[in-house]
Structure formats: C-alpha cells, structure tokens
C-alpha cells in the first residue's frame, strides 16, 4: 500500500513539473514576442524585384533581431513618403528620390535614407506588338505609359533614352497621366503602344497574350540607386538600435539571394506571391539576377546619391543637389 502511495505521489510531482515547464516555456515565448518591437513598413509596390526584403520576412531575419514587421502596400513613392511623414508608417520603402522631394519641400522632421535594396530600375518594357530584335529607336513616334512624372521609373526611362540619343520630349510620348498601380490595366484596355511594368505584372501580362516583354529598363539605364529605406529623423534618433537591426536583417536577405539559386529564392518567397507559380517566380528572379538588380550591401554611397541627383536635375525634377550628409544616416 505504501509503495502505491509513493508511486502516486511521485507521478503527481512529475505531472506538476512537466506542466510547470510547459507553462514556463509558453511564457518565455510570450515574453520574446513582447520584447519584439513592432514597426509598420510602407512599400511602394509588391514585386519580386524586392526579393531580398521578402526573404528577410519569410526566413525570420527580422524576428531574429527583435522586430515584427507589418507590411502595407502604398502605391507610389509620394504616397509612401506621405505615410511616413503622417506617422501611418514607421519606415518607407520607395524610390530614393522621395527623401529629396520631402527635404526640398521644407519639412522639418524630414526623411533620411539608411539602406539600399536595389541598384537598377526593376521595370520591363512591354510592347503591344511582337518586335524582333527590339531597339530603343522602335519607340520613336510611339506612346509609352511611363508612370508618375518625377518618379524613378519615369526618370530612369528618360535617362535611358537620352543615353541612346533619343529625346524623350520630342521623339517619344511618355504618358505620365496613369497611376502607377493602374498602368497594366490601362495598357490592357488599349492605352499606349508600350508600358513599363514591374514583375510579376510584366510576365503575367505577357502570358495572358496582351503584350511582349522587349527590354529591361534597368539594363538600359545602368546602375542607379533605385529603391531604399527611409524614416523620419526623429524616429531614427529615437530608434537607432532598431534601424541598425532592421538593416542587418535586410543585409541577410541580400546575402541569401546572392548565395542561393533562383529556385531556392522562389521557394523562400512564394508565400508573398500566392497567385504566381513557383516556376514563374524563379523565372522573374533570374530576370532580375541577370541585370544585376541587387547590390552586395545595403550601403548607399555618396557617388550613387550624386548620380541619382544628376538624373533628377537632367529630368528637371530638381534645380540643385542636396548634400549627402543631410539625407543619409550611417549607423
């Protein structure tokens, strides 16, 4: 009888200890979540072009450094910067020109860039007609849906045309009246002879028989500091550790993309693109890899920043350059 009582007591103690350990582990997990800082990230568009960012999200790189990211779609760089300035978003992800416009607008709590994700234009030129051996001269006398005037896609297109001896004001009609997010639909509806689209939109339009991808604007335009992360100077000053950790997570995403195959990258980000097949995602990753769209590091060099402003001045978007130190945060 005593033996049975002892066994019963020991069993009860073991059950209690196991339950306590489970509760402790659950509480430990909760405390880890509580310690993670939640931030809202406004992205200019949702594209495979930004594969390193989605890798960082899906592989848990942000969580590793104590950050929970809420990703919101805010179509257009002007809307991204507006969301950050109004505090609807903590960090903005868009064309690097956005911070320059905000600074020139006289905003006191202006935006500073702290990391770069892409180094070339991510849009592809889609033609309504099939063109064998496409040349930029094929655009002469035609209408191109090019995005918002003064936005990086439109400015890079003009830059590429000028580099190849074509006057974008006289030789080609660049239609900037169509909202960035509506360009594909407008083209399908019959507007324009060509349209510039990000992926996977360009591939999807091609597969549906509405057009043909004839060129990469990124390949034509060369190295341009294209999309980057920025935040209000007050937010950066109050959250320097978070900004530095955010940058570390993005760097890991960039490293992953450079060190893994197109198929592996596609598998890593497929949950971000549920309506696109694994095969198509891998094709698009290859397209971007082939044009060297992603830099090796998040560093935004002074030379790149000045080159960006040269393009903007040439486009007539700004009159003079803003000093590098004014708009760059180096943690």
Image (spheres, rainbow, N blue to C red):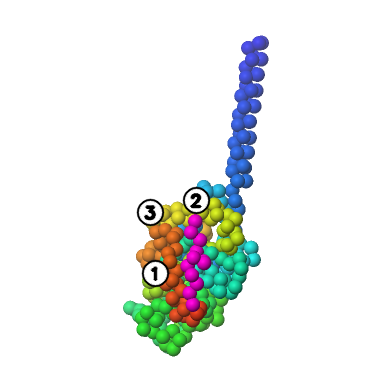
In reply to whether residue 264 is colored magenta, the answer given is no
Circle 2: element type: helix
| Residue 22 point in image, percent of width and height | 61, 34
| Residue 303 point in image, percent of width and height | 41, 68
- For residue 196, say whether it is visible: no
**Which quarter of the figure has residue 234?**
bottom right
Q: Which residue is mark 2?
A: 61
Q: Outermost residue, left direction?
A: 133
- Looking at the image, tell me whether mark 2 or mark 1 is earlier in sequence order: 2
Q: Which residue is mark 3?
A: 259
Give me the residue at 59% from left, 36% from top.
Answer: 25
Of circles 1 and 3, the one toward us is 1
Give me the residue at 56% from left, 51% from top.
Answer: 67
- Looking at the image, tell me whether mark 2 or mark 3 is earlier in sequence order: 2
In reply to whether residue 328 is colored magenta, the answer given is yes
Give me the residue at 48% from left, 53% from top.
Answer: 248
Above or below for 62 versus 106: above
User: Which stretch did the figure color magenta?
Assistant: 320-331
**Which quarter of the figure has residue 136?**
bottom left
Q: Which residue is mark 1?
A: 223
């Amino acid at each position: 009888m005593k033996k049975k009582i002892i066994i019963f007591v020991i069993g009860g103690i073991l059950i209690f200890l196991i339950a306590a350990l489970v509760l402790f582990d659950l509480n430990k997990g909760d405390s880890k979540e509580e310690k993670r800082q939640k931030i809202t990230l406004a992205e200019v568009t949702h594209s495979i072009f930004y594969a390193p960012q989605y890798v960082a999200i899906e592989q848990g790189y942000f969580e590793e450094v104590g950050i929970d990211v809420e990703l919101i779609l805010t179509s257009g760089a002007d809307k991204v910067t507006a969301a950050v300035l109004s505090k609807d978003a903590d960090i903005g992800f868009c064309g690097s020109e956005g911070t320059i416009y905000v600074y020139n607008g006289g905003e006191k709590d202006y935006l500073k860039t702290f990391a770069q994700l892409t180094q070339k234009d991510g849009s592809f030129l889609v033609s309504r007609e099939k063109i064998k051996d496409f040349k930029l001269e094929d655009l002469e006398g035609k209408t191109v849906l090019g995005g918002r005037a003064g936005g990086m896609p439109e400015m890079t297109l003009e830059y590429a045309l000028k580099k190849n001896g074509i006057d974008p004001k006289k030789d080609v009609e660049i239609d900037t009246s169509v909202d960035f997010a509506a360009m594909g639909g407008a083209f399908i509806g019959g507007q324009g002879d060509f349209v510039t689209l990000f992926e996977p939109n360009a591939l999807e339009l091609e597969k549906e028989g509405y057009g043909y991808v004839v060129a990469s604007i990124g390949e034509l335009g060369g190295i341009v500091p294209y999309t980057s992360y920025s935040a209000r100077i007050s937010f950066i000053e109050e959250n320097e550790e978070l900004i530095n950790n955010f940058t570390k997570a993005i760097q890991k995403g960039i490293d992953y993309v450079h060190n893994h195959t197109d198929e592996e990258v596609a598998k890593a980000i497929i949950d971000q693109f549920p309506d696109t097949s694994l095969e198509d995602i891998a094709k698009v990753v290859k397209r971007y890899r082939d044009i060297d769209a992603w830099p090796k590091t998040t560093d935004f060099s002074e030379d790149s920043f000045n080159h960006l402003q040269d393009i903007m001045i040439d486009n007539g978007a700004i009159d003079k350059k803003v000093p590098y130190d004014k708009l760059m945060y180096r943690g």
